[in-house]
């Protein structure tokens, strides 16, 4: 670990700082854009913040550096310990879902760090979203430590402590604010762009034989699918009609596509190309929007399966028919 | 924001409930409420099947089938014949 925030002391307890440096902020920005996000880790183990003693609180968290940074920032001014589990550089909620932020890892990390000899109390404060990986009563049975689930967001920790370790409904509820969704957009758009590159390659090759090659207007129309499915649907999620993400993506997609085929004149004088695009583009948008279920904080796997049972065949059929129409339009015109 | 209705696998056996309030504490979508010192489901459609309540229920009064709620992962699972997992091919999706 080369980060300036942390260093070892002789007892094996590492030191953590509460100040965010320029480097921390730059690192966060890179991760949000998908650069090196699978290797943004801190060393698992016990960290001391301020000057903790044997009565100080112990907060448990994941070894994803964004997670660690948001926690240590919120704990500024406190004397406490942070027990970092090895979640393979994944945030608490996703790691809990996979089981790496889990009972076994917590129990073994308590033993490895000798926590029972460092603090005299037997309480651990875990982020609430770790609860889908941690079984509190088994931790108690195996280590003697009582698990207290703190608030969902690190920013509520001080309020939680001031209320006598009590979180109200608001602190316990996951949100999915506009800001939460906007920071996810680059990681929707960039993979969608990568997904599209082979398609651009195929169209480039097709241009050699087509009477009317694909041009900048076709590219702009295709970009409507990315804009609708990977950008607009995530950002405008609550105000787009429908519950299924694929339906939301399709609605935004058809609106943008209608505008494009009208703007570029196909609607007026090339109805085959226009129909091809109207079938194809909204479905590609629906596909990208449907993938946003993986990033959302409120979609159930059962619901995703249900929407897929309709959406996947619909997308496949419309994409195939739309593509055929498009090529017919481009060859025959 | 609400997702698709009447689909979740969440089940609560009130007879087994001790009234410890753990489910109410861990639920990120406030699905549970206490009723006569026992847990009750007040908002089933808000459930996202994360499994926290079932895992932390000391008497196993709650059951839910947790899973990966990501369409891309499910499609990949279908194509490769493996269980859907959160690890995306290139960068990981969460």
Image (cartoon, rainbow, N blue to C red):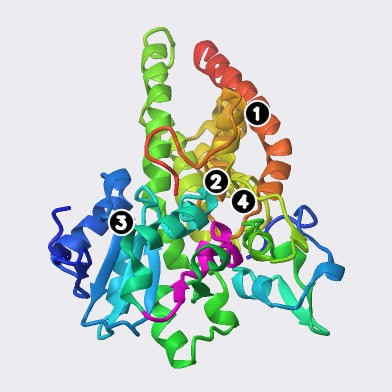
Q: Residue at x 44, y 54 (%)?
A: A105
> Badge 2 is on which residue?
A289
> Badge 4 is on which residue?
A248
To which chain does the residue with label 4 belong? A
Dividing the picture into quadrants, the one containing residue A268 is top right
* Depth order, front residue of A328/B20: B20
Q: Are marks 3 and 1 in contact (CB under 8 Å)?
A: no
Cα distance, mark 4 to mark 2? 7 Å
* Residue A219 lies in the magenta stretch: no
Describe residue B1's horizontal placement relative to residue A102 as left or right: right
For the residue carrying disc 1, how many other residues have a C-alpha within 10 Å: few (<14), some (14-19), or many (20+)? Answer: many
Q: Which of marks 2 and 4 precedes in the sequence?
A: 4
Cα distance, mark 3 to mark 1? 49 Å
To which chain does the residue with label 3 belong? A
Q: Residue at x 28, y 45 (%)?
A: A39
Q: Are marks 1 and 2 in contact (CB under 8 Å)?
A: no
Residue A55 against residue A195 in the figure, above or below: below
The answer as to whether the residues below labels 4 and 1 share one chain is: yes
Q: Secondary structure at mark 2?
A: helix
Q: Which of marks 3 and 2 precedes in the sequence?
A: 3
> Badge 3 is on which residue?
A44
Cα distance, mark 4 to mark 1? 16 Å
The answer as to whether the residues below labels 4 and 2 share one chain is: yes
> Badge 1 is on which residue?
A318
Q: What segment carries the magenta color?
A: A120-139
* Depth order, front residue of A62/A114: A114
Cα distance, mark 1 to mark 2? 16 Å
For the residue carrying disc 2, how many other residues have a C-alpha within 10 Å: few (<14), some (14-19), or many (20+)? Answer: many
To which chain does the residue with label 2 belong? A
Residue A266 position, x and y percent, is 53, 31
Residue A149 in sight from this viewpoint: yes
């Amino acid at each position: 670990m080369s980060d300036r925030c942390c260093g070892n002391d002789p007892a094996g307890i590492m030191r953590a700082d509460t100040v965010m440096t320029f480097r921390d902020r730059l690192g966060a920005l890179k991760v949000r854009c998908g650069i090196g996000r699978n290797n943004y880790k801190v060393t698992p183990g016990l960290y001391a913040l301020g000057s903790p003693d044997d009565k100080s609180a112990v907060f448990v968290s994941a070894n994803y550096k964004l997670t660690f940074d948001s926690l240590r920032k919120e704990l500024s001014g406190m004397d406490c310990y942070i027990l970092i589990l090895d979640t393979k550089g994944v945030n608490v909620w996703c790691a809990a879902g996979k089981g790496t932020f889990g009972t076994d890892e917590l129990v073994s990390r308590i033993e490895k760090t000798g926590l029972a000899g460092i603090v005299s109390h037997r309480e651990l404060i875990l982020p609430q979203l770790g609860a889908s990986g941690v079984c509190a009563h088994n931790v108690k049975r195996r280590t003697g430590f009582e698990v207290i689930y703190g608030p969902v967001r690190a920013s509520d920790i001080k309020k939680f402590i001031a209320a006598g370790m009590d979180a109200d409904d608001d602190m316990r509820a996951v949100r999915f604010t506009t800001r939460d969704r906007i920071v996810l957009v680059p990681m929707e758009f960039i993979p969608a762009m990568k997904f599209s590159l082979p398609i651009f390659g195929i169209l480039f090759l097709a241009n050699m034989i087509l009477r009317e090659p694909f041009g900048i207007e076709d590219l702009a129309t295709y970009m409507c699918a990315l804009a609708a499915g990977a950008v607009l649907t995530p950002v405008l999620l609550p105000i787009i009609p429908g519950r299924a993400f694929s339906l939301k993506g399709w609605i935004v997609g058809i609106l943008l596509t209608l505008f494009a085929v009208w703007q570029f004149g196909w609607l007026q004088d090339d109805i085959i190309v226009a129909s091809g695009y109207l079938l194809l583009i909204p479905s590609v948008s629906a596909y990208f929007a449907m993938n946003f279920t993986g990033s959302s904080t409120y979609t159930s796997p059962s619901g995703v399966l249900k929407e897929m049972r309709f959406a996947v065949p619909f997308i496949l059929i419309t994409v195939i028919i739309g593509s055929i129409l498009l090529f017919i339009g481009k060859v025959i015109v | 924001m609400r997702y698709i209705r009447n689909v979740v696998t969440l089940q609560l056996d009130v007879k087994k409930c001790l009234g410890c309030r753990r489910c109410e504490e861990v639920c990120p979508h406030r699905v549970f409420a206490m009723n006569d010192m026992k847990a009750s489901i007040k908002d089933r459609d808000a459930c996202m099947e994360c499994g926290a309540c079932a895992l932390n229920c000391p008497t196993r009064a709650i059951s839910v089938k947790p899973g990966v709620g990501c369409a891309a992962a499910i499609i990949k699972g279908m194509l490769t014949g493996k269980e859907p997992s959160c690890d995306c091919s290139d960068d990981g999706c969460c």
